[in-house]
Amino acid sequence: VSGEQISNIGSENMDNATVLKLAKRINKLLTSKDVDGIVVTHGTDTMEETAYFLNLVVKSKKPVVMVGAMRPATAISADGPLNLYNAVKIASSKRAQNKGILVALNDQISAARYVTKTNTTATDTFKSAEQGYLGTVAGGNVIFYNNPTRKHTTQSVFDVSKLDKLPQVDVIYTYQNDNRYLYDAAVKQGAKGIIVAGYGNGTMSDAALSGAKAAVKKGSLVVRSSHAGSGTVTYEASDDKNKFITSDSLNPQKARILLMLALTKTKDRKQIQEYFNEY
């Protein structure tokens, strides 16, 4: 086991430049015959975003495991040491190969595509509400019960090896009495895409809808997601008329990741919708 530091920041400050740097370094390391797997220590606040980004751009079947802690090292019953130990166990397991990027906390093994942080402080905060965990670490043994079904890593068309920046994509949250000015501001500030964290099945108020439509007319792509916490945002007949994209079951923050990468490949709405259906 060896280590190196890519950055030293709180995960709330993770940005596009840092995730690109991390992805490129991981891909380089994984080409070495001396590297069997990689563990990435990461703050929990944006861990799911980094994990999903890596899930789409890492080009290896070798295990890559994201790990963090909900309690500081100075806390009673700090969870970091065991989480880190388990992550190393997972990354060194042949059974963990070709499963995409994994997230390991609280003895559970989760898929980057499905997992999300659900609690502000609890050690079992990372959950896959509908799809469930992939496996567990029990008695020192790495055990898998499920496999992720969406495209990832070596199956992915996305490649960051020649990218030094990513398109600007913003997330706009819906709420009672919202207005369209946030959409106008996003477009004015250069947003190439907007993720709408909508109600329920990705719905919007009339005011927000007018802002989203205006954004599309000015060349931005709009994806309907949901802040409900789980569930699939389904296609509606009005999506073709409005030229909107639906996020499938991706939450707003992960939909942003996919749309950024999709925009490095194409601006075609139908093709990007296929990406959301496949990844």
Image (cartoon, grey):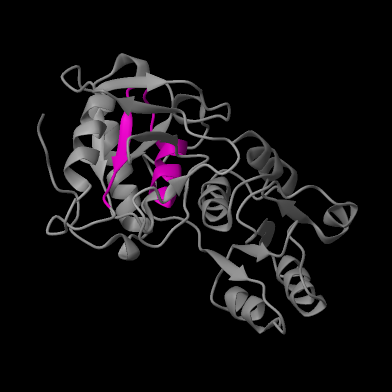
Tell me if residue 114 can be seen: yes
Tell me if residue 97 can be seen: no
**Residue 90 picture quarter:** top left
**Span highlighted in magenta in the image:** 48-69
**Residue 175 picture quarter:** bottom right
Q: Position of residue 132 (x, y in %)?
A: 53, 35
Out of 53 and 118, give the one closest to the viewer. 118
Residue occupying the point 60% across, 40% down: 130
Q: Is residue 61 left or right of residue 43?
A: right
Q: Is residue 101 left or right of residue 140?
A: right
Residue occupying the point 27% across, 26% down: 91
Residue occupying the point 35% across, 60% down: 121
Q: Quadrant of the N terminus?
A: top left
Residue sitting farthest toward the front = 76
Q: Position of residue 17 (x, y in %)?
A: 33, 57
User: Is 52 in the magenta?
Assistant: yes
**Residue 135 picture quarter:** top left
Q: How many numbered marks does the figure carry? A: 0
User: Is 97 in the magenta?
Assistant: no
Q: Is residue 150 left or right of residue 222?
A: left
Q: Position of residue 252 (x, y in %)?
A: 58, 57
Q: Quadrant of the C terminus?
A: top right
Out of 184 and 39, give the one closest to the viewer. 39
Q: Position of residue 199 (x, y in %)?
A: 71, 65
Residue occupying the point 75% across, 44% down: 270
Out of 135 and 91, give the one closest to the viewer. 135
* In the depicted structure, whether residue 92 falls above or below residue 237: above
